[in-house]
Image: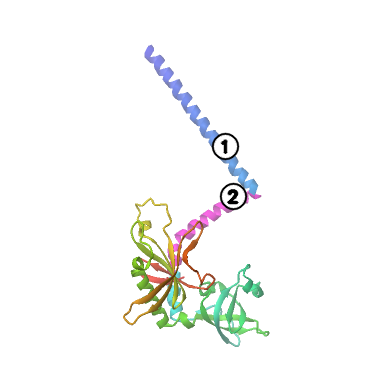
Amino acid sequence: MNSNKSKQIWMIIVAVAVIFVAFLWYRSYSAKKNNLLNKTETTGSESSLRDTLDENENQMISDEEAEAIDAEEEDFNAICENGEWVNISDQSGNSSSLTGKLRKVYPDDEAAKEFAGFQFFLEGAEKIALTGTNLDKMDYFEDREVEVQGAKSANGKEIAVFQVKCAGKETDKNVINDRKKMMDYISANINTIAPKKAKYKSWVVDEIDIVDENNVYVLYYDAVEDDENSDLEEDTGRKLLLEISPKTDGTYDIKQTAYFEMGEDDYVAVQGTDKFADSETVDYSFDPESNVWERY
């Protein structure tokens, strides 16, 4: 009898506990649901929630396609360095050939204000708007020296692009090889070039931005950040502005112009002067898997 009563009491306790847990869950669920609805109402429509979900899904797809995008960029770099033509459209007409830097039109760019309404323009001996179909193919050519072939408009202010290819230093094998040798040297010697020793392991070059053949920015970080077992939360990034010139023995004369450490949002010069702060650079990053410097 006592045993049956004990079982009944125990079952009552368990039932009450289950009901209590269910109540807590429902209250939490209701709160989350209300918050979600409030957010949806705040954005102005129920579709905003779907937009957010779609955006997250697109981001996931983008992450999955990252390797394919990297491969495509690598293929383009080879096409560019080899000076291969890329077909943009099959339009016909009298063809003209122009050279210069291919620029993309951004709404807040004062220099491109005269080309509002166009996607790209060519900046060379003359500035001219680029028109035609399939212009998205030209995204990879942005800020590169190119040759464009196409049909000029009657007023000479536009050119409908047939094909485009890299030109000038972009295809100069001597310039390309000299840059890669210089970057290899800096990467191999960064621990002696850097003004301070790495706090944890050793310095690793991540990116080199070339102002011209004698001035470069070098971005580097502590190799501890590559350790999967490291729980380091500190950003170890550093940056140098170097003046560099080749020597006959295959090494380089290197002079530090400025040294930067990471501030709250960006690098801050703590030594020297950033005299090329507003200059255009040619940017390379090192791919450890393929063991090559990649232009981007």
Residue drawn at (58%, 53%), measured in percent from left and top?
A: 51
| Mark 1 lies on residue | 30
149 vs 262, nearest the viewer: 262
20 vs 133, nearest the viewer: 20
| Mark 2 lies on residue | 49
Whichever of callouts 2 and 1 sits on the residue coming sooner in the sequence is 1
Q: Is residue 134 visible?
A: no
Splitting the image into 4 quarters, where does residue 221 fall? bottom left
- Would residue 293 be found to the left or right of residue 43 on screen? left
* Outermost residue, right side: 155
On screen, 77 above or below 8?
below
* Outermost residue, top side: 1
Local packing at callout 1 (Cα closer than 10 Å; few below 14, some 14-19, many 20+) is few
Residue 99 x/y as whole percent:
55, 83
Q: Which mark is residue 138?
A: none
Splitting the image into 4 quarters, where does residue 195 fall? bottom left
Q: How is the image coloured?
A: rainbow
**Residue 46 shown in magenta:** yes
Q: Which residues are magenta?
A: 43-71
16 vs 289, nearest the viewer: 289
On screen, 1 above or below 48?
above
Q: Mark 1 falls on what kind of element?
A: helix
**Residue 68 shown in magenta:** yes
Residue drawn at (38%, 62%), measured in percent from left and top?
A: 196
Residue 258 x/y as whole percent:
46, 68
| Amino acid bearing label 1 | Ser
* Outermost residue, left side: 249
